Amino acid sequence: GLFLLVGFTSLVPVLRGLINPAIITWQKELRFFRDSVYTLGLTIVEALATIILALIFKSVFALVGGIVLSVLFEVIFTFIMFHDRPRFQYLHSRAKEILWNMWGLNAMAVLN
C-alpha cells in the first residue's frame, strides 16, 4: 500500500516538469492579478478533486489523486492559455555545466 502511494506521489514532480514555461510571462509582465486568479483556480480544482475522490474512494489515495489531477489540469490549462510552445534544444556546454554541478550536490547529499 505505502509503496504504491509513494510511487503515485512521485508522479507529481514529473508532471510539473511538463507545465508550459510561458506561464512565467505573467510575472515578468507584472500581471499579478492574473497569476493570483490562476493560483486560486488551481487551489479550487485541487480541493474539489480531493473532496470528490475522498467521497468516492474513502482512502488516503484520494489526497494524492487530488494533487495529481490538479497538476494534470495545470499542465493542460497552461498549454491552452499560452500559444507559445517550448522547444527542446540540447546545448552541450549547458549540459556539461549542469552535470558538473550535479556531482557537487550528490557529494553533499552523501556526506549529509
Image: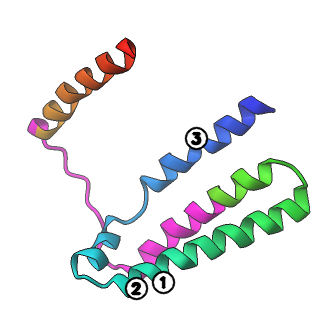
All told, the count of numbered labels is 3
Residue at 13% in and 40% down: 94
Marks 2/3 in contact by CB < 8 Å: the verdict is: no
Q: Name the residue under label 1.
A: 37
Marks 1/2 in contact by CB < 8 Å: the verdict is: yes
In the image, farthest residue toward the left = 93
Q: Name the residue under label 3.
A: 10
Disc 1 versus disc 3: distance between alpha carbons? 27 Å
Disc 2 versus disc 3: distance between alpha carbons? 29 Å
In the image, farthest residue toward the top = 111
Q: Badge 2: how crowded within 10 Å, few (<14), some, or many (20+)?
A: few
Q: Which amino acid does label 3 sit on?
A: Ser
Q: Where is residue 100 drawn, in percent x and y?
A: 17, 25
Q: Which amino acid does label 2 sit on?
A: Arg
Q: In this view, does 94 lie above or below 82?
A: above
Residue at 73% in and 68% down: 49
Q: Badge 3: how crowded within 10 Å, few (<14), some, or many (20+)?
A: few
Q: Nearer the viewer, mark 1 or mark 3?
A: 1
| Mark identifier at residue 85 | none
Q: Badge 1: how crowded within 10 Å, few (<14), some, or many (20+)?
A: few
Magenta region: 69-93
Examine the structure image and report whether residue 10 is included in the region drawn in magenta.
no
N-terminal-most mark, 1 or 3: 3
Q: Is mark 1 on a helix, strand or loop?
A: helix
Q: Where is residue 70 drawn, in percent x and y?
A: 61, 65
